[in-house]
Image: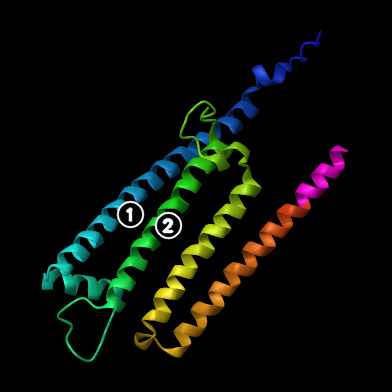
């Protein structure tokens, strides 16, 4: 017969100051609500760009010019119809919005679960798989990976539209991307070392 787990009185009733400090985590709630609002803005931006793309396919010149202005595409001759480069840049911009939206979801859901309060999603059929073992270290690694993906999309957009950028801009974007990559590798390696030491201490 298993022995009942010992109760910890401090877990049930905190002293006033620790209780106040612990309750201060709810001050982060408006921040996550603000990120949800930012998510809504990205959804609106995505659909505006998608509608412009569909209208441009059917020859709408105003929509075409809005796309060209939005992606910063410039050529010497006027553009009167979609070409492969414009379509590719617009699609990459849409993918960029989706990846940033995914990043927002990870920050909102993972951050709230880690730093504010449990969501009790264990029995929910749509619970994200990564949320099962989320903690501050895992969240940092996932955010680092997401930022690298976003940076890769931006760098690809820049290279496709390289004629409209100076060599200095291309160089610095590449350096910044490599910096993000090295930073993510360093975070992942540090997390691996900490996990290894944690398992060693338990044994």
The residue indicated by pointer 1 is 42
Question: Residue at 66% of width from left, 22% of height from top?
Answer: 15
Indicate the position of residue 21 as horizontal and vertical percent values.
60, 33
Task: Check the image and name the residue furthest to the right.
Answer: 203
Indicate the position of residue 53 as horizontal and vertical percent values.
22, 65
Quarter of the rendering occupied by the N terminus? top right
Magenta stretch: give its range. Answer: 194-203
The local crowd at label 2, few if under 14, some if 14 to 19, many if 20 or more residues have their Cα within 10 Å, is some
195 falls in the magenta region: yes
Indicate the position of residue 122 as horizontal and vertical percent values.
54, 28
Task: Note whether 114 is above or below 154 in the view shown.
Answer: above
Task: Check the image and name the residue furthest to the top.
Answer: 1
Lateral position of residue 19 relative to residue 57, left or right: right
Q: Nearest the camera: 42 or 149?
A: 149
Chosen colour scheme: rainbow
- Mark 1 touching mark 2, by CB under 8 A? yes
């Amino acid at each position: 017969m298993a022995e009942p787990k010992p109760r910890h009185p401090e877990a049930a009733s905190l002293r006033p100051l620790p209780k106040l400090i612990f309750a201060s985590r709810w001050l982060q709630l408006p921040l996550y609500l603000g990120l949800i609002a930012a998510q809504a803005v990205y959804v609106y931006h995505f659909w505006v760009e998608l509608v412009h793309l569909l209208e441009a396919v059917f020859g709408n010149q105003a929509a075409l010019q809005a796309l060209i202005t939005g992606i910063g595409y410039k050529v010497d001759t006027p553009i009167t119809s979609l070409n492969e480069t414009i379509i590719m840049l617009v699609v990459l911009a849409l993918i960029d919005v989706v990846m940033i939206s995914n990043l927002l979801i990870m920050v909102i859901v993972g951050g709230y679960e880690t730093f504010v309060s449990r969501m009790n999603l264990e029995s929910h059929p749509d619970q994200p798989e990564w949320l099962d073992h989320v903690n501050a270290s895992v969240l940092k690694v996932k955010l680092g990976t997401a930022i690298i993906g976003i940076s890769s999309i931006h760098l690809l957009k820049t290279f496709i539209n390289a004629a409209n950028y100076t060599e200095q801009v291309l160089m610095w974007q590449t350096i910044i991307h490599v910096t993000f990559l090295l930073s993510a590798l360093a975070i992942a390696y540090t997390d691996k070392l900490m996990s290894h030491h944690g398992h060693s201490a338990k044994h």
